[in-house]
Image (tube, rainbow, N blue to C red):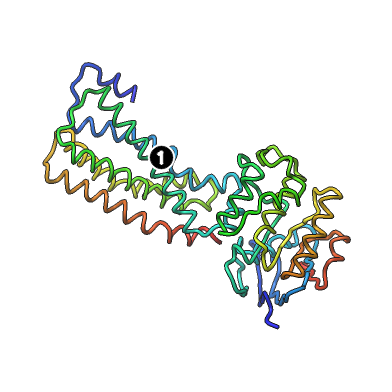
Amino acid sequence: MKPLLVVEGLSKRYGRQSLFQNVSLELARGDVLVVTGANGSGKSTFLRCLVGLETPDRGTITFDGDPSTFWGFSAIDQAVYANLTVAEHLEFTADCRGTEANVRFWLERIGLAAFADRPAGLLSTGMRARLKLALAAQAGPQILALDEPGAALDADGIALIDDLVREQAERGACILATNDPAERRYGNLELAIGA
Amino acid sequence: MMAISLAAFSTKLSGTLGAGLYWVALLFASLLTAPRRFTNEEEQRTGDLLRLVARPHSVFWGKALWVLAELAANAIVLAGTFLLFTGQNVAQPGIFALGLFGTVLALAGATSVSGAMASRARQSTGLAATLALPLLLPIIFLGMAALRTGLGDGVVENGWRSAVGLVGYGIASLAVGPYLFAAVWKR
């Protein structure tokens, strides 16, 4: 079976600090890769390199498809538009990607139906985290990359992650950057950054 | 515009001086707002979300067309109030109108290109304004020549040439913009 993602010799450094060196991996449908490492070790940067938000110093990342629909990405420090409402975010990202917005479905799924018309700037941190999960998974990506997905989420939010990861593993693959023991249990593959 | 009208109170402005004053007002208005359309995504940290879902050419055109509409509104309102407050006569309406259109197009192109180039830098708004300066010099030169002819000073033939030059400059800079933007948008 052809892999969904092939990473060869990926390296990144900031100044004199080497974050990761010569990382190679392959992800196939059904894989859940857990990326672990101490704070500041480069887990988030590794994910950002994969999804195209950072350029690695060396190495190649190969996948088939339009990056905007191939990848779904959510990170704890990712900002949303403070003035756009929850529903407008879902419509806007779907318009940009050229995919179906399914606003009602996603509002129900992330438990924000009652807050559809609330500007994202007025949401709590946990609500914003749910919105970012919806924006990441909305287009049905081939690979869902989640950076510290459980941070700031309550029990319902954790259950949402559980659903999304299992669903994603059936559709494609998933990458989680986390040190949370509960989230590490999702993985069938593990990559330790900075080890 | 209020300051210009007070300064020119009971004074008949020449076409050249009128065009110069109009340009000061237009440049001030456009440099304050236009480059920010490109840099505010980074300042508000929403650039990552946009980068994940949108193609760079679409982002550039969305922003550049918004800048164009904003500058067109600026230029038209400024031209109306300028003519009203200073009592200037438009001696060559065709040159004046084409000059204004070319000015808006060229300013939109230049500020979009400079905004695109500076969008990923720290202190990007200041850098965008600095980068815009050399791009603005030919526009100021051509725009002054077109508007002063439109207001009754200068040679008509040169006025037309300058107005057409502005339109060409605008089209060229808007054509280059998406490629520059795509190069710096994803790093």
A90 left or right of B34? Answer: right
* Quarter of the figure with residue A84: top right
In the figure, B33 relative to B52: above or below?
above
- What residue is at 77 percent from the left and 45 percent from the top? A126
Q: Position of residue A88 (x, y in %)?
A: 61, 45
Q: Secondary structure at mark 1?
A: helix
Label 1 neighbour load within 10 Å: few <14, some 14-19, many 20+: some
Query: What amino acid type is highlighted by mark number 1?
Result: Glu
Residue A134 at what x, y percent from top left?
70, 54
In the image, farthest residue toward the bottom: A1
Q: Residue at x 34, y 22 (%)?
A: B2
Q: Which residue is mark 1?
A: B70
Residue at the image position 28 percent from the left and 31 percent from the top: B21
Identify the residue shown where x is 69% and y is 37%: A122
Task: Work out whether residue B146 or residue B137 is closer to the camera in this orientation and state it.
Answer: B146
Q: Nearer the viewer, residue B128 or A145?
A: A145
Is residue A168 shown left or right of residue B149?
Answer: right
The foreground one among A93 and B8 is A93
Left-right relation of B76 to B182: left
Quadrant of the image for the N terminus of chain A? bottom right
Location of the C terminus of chain A by quadrant is: bottom right
Q: Position of residue A48 (x, y in %)?
A: 66, 62
Q: Chain of mark 1?
A: B
